[in-house]
Amino acid sequence: MTAAVSSARPGGNAHTTLFALSGDTVLEPVTVVVNPDDDPQFMRMAFAAHQPCFGHITVHPTPLAGETIHLAHDLIRSLGKHLPLPDQYSGRSRFANTTDSWHIAAAWSLALGINRLTVCRAHLLRLPKWRRLFALSACTRTRLTLLCNGPIPQEALPLLDSVPHRILDRPDTAADHWRTPAGLQELDCHPRWQHHAAFPPGDD
């Protein structure tokens, strides 16, 4: 099953629940790393691939978070960012809904030059989250990698078959996939990745 490649093009709008994409939209090939035995070395490689200075991000989804908005928030935090502060009058964020949260994730991904996104434990994600991730990948031209520490969800198979993809199931091929290319230049936005002030900010 290693490096099985599908050249199918996306059809219809099954994965366009976030953005208005046409049927001719070409997605970057999706990579699914299958680790049915939950071998820890796959997770170590995925975490090591988190290199924001090179535009590579790894997201470890919040356990038991069922809504797609939670995955958007996980992505935003992995980008080193946060949602806007709550409104001082209502105490609620203006961007507390699902669509706006995914728009923020997409905007920061584009602004920070993200080109590779790895999502761990994708076998636990329901179909709506897979659709959101595919739409995000299409709109930001980000190469998406889904690490399944178990079988690929049956409900996600038709969606996966609708896009160009490959499946990796060996440590060596996964390591090659996640390895940072030699000579890759750091992004200009790298100095802005780390914040040094408290959040939320103090009264002063």
Image (cartoon, grey):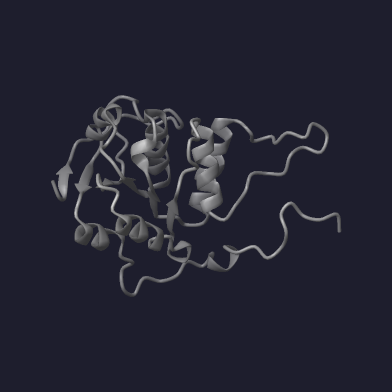
Residue 120 as seen in the image, left or right of residue 189: left
Where is residue 133? Give x, y as percent. Answer: 40, 39
In the figure, residue 25 lies in which quadrant?
top left
Residue at 64% over, 62% down: 195
Residue 77 as seen in the image, left or right of residue 60: right
Q: Is residue 39 above or below residue 23?
A: below
Where is residue 190? Give x, y as percent. Answer: 53, 67
Image mark count: 0
* Residue farthest along the bottom direction in this orientation: 183
Viewer-nearest residue: 2 or 189: 2
Viewer-nearest residue: 64 or 99: 64
Viewer-nearest residue: 27 or 60: 60
Residue 75 as seen in the image, left or right of residue 141: right
Quarter of the rendering occupied by the C terminus: bottom right
Viewer-nearest residue: 30 or 33: 33
Where is residue 129? Give x, y as percent. Answer: 42, 33
Q: Is residue 162 above or below residue 186?
A: above
Q: Is residue 118 above or below residue 159?
A: below
Residue at 51% over, 52% down: 78
Where is residue 124? Give x, y as percent. Answer: 37, 36
Residue at 50% over, 44% down: 106
Residue at 26% over, 35% down: 160
